[in-house]
């Protein structure tokens, strides 16, 4: 890769890299087959009273974030598959699990682009729970937002790029 990601923006913004990252992380960490679906945001937890969002920032040659969003019931299901425990509420273990899933998605995604892994750091995951909130990024370079499902569980993963060097 040259000295600029901008020269490789098509590779960086390739939606297949996000799909492959989600499939890989969910198969490896949860033991489930996961696929992209065309169902919209409502399927990814917007209809539930409580939603769970994890955000991991990118810094370096690419500035932006990886965002995982689901309803509370899906977050508890993901955490249950990770830990072997059952959950009745979104507690600290569920939040930590969703943060770790988002962190692994971000790391796996950036590893799909040659040269990006070594020149782009990740932040500690931030977790947001509640209802009636939106994350807004002003004028991103590009944004990938896909909804995925495993079993009957839907969630969304977004890659937002603020800037490329």
Image (tube, grey):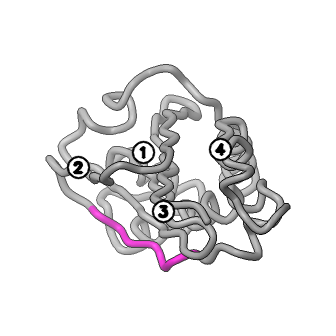
- Is 147 located above or below residue 38 in the figure? below
Residue with the most extreme top position: 38
Where is residue 92 drawn, in percent x and y? 36, 74
Among numbered discs 3 and 1, the one appearing first in the sequence:
3
**Residue at which label 1 appears:** 74
Q: Is residue 152 above or below residue 74?
A: above
Few, some or many C-alpha atoms within 10 Å of disc 2 (few <14, some 14-19, many ≥20)? few
* Nearer the camera: disc 4 or disc 1: 4
Residue 91 in view, yes or no: yes
Q: Horizontal placement of 86 versus 132: left or right? A: right
Residue 76 horizontal/vertical position (percent)? 42, 54
Q: Nearer the viewer, mark 3 or mark 4?
A: 3
Report the residue that reaches farthest toward the left: 132
**What is the secondary structure assignment of the residue under circle 4?**
helix
**Distance Cα–Cα, label 2 vs label 4:** 21 Å
Is residue 126 on the magenta stretch? yes
Q: Is residue 157 visible?
A: no
Image point (48%, 69%), residue name: 57
Of callouts 2 and 1, which one flags the residue occurring earlier in the amino acid sequence? 1
Which of the numbered marks, if any, corresponds to residue 134?
Answer: 2
Figure label count = 4
Q: Secondary structure at mark 3?
A: strand
Tell me the mark number nearer the camera, choosing from 2 and 1.
2
Residue, disc 3: 64
Q: Disc 2, disc 1: CB below 8 Å?
A: no
Q: Say above or below: 151 vs 125.
A: above
Q: Which mark is residue 18?
A: 4
């Amino acid at each position: 890769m040259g000295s600029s990601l901008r020269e490789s923006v098509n590779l960086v913004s390739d939606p297949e890299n996000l799909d492959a990252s989600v499939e890989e992380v969910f198969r490896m960490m949860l033991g489930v087959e996961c696929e992209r679906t065309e169902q919209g945001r409502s399927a990814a937890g917007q209809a539930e009273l409580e939603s769970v969002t994890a955000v991991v920032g990118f810094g370096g040659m690419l500035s932006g974030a990886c965002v995982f969003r689901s309803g509370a019931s899906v977050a508890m299901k993901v955490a249950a598959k990770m830990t072997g425990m059952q959950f009745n509420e979104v507690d600290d273990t569920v939040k930590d699990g969703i943060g770790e899933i988002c962190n692994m998605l971000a790391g796996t995604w950036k590893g799909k682009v040659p040269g990006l892994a070594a020149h782009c750091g990740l932040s500690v995951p931030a977790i947001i729970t509640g209802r009636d909130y939106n994350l807004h990024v002003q004028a991103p370079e590009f944004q990938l937002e896909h909804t995925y499902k495993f079993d009957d569980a839907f969630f969304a993963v977004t890659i937002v790029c603020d800037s490329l060097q």
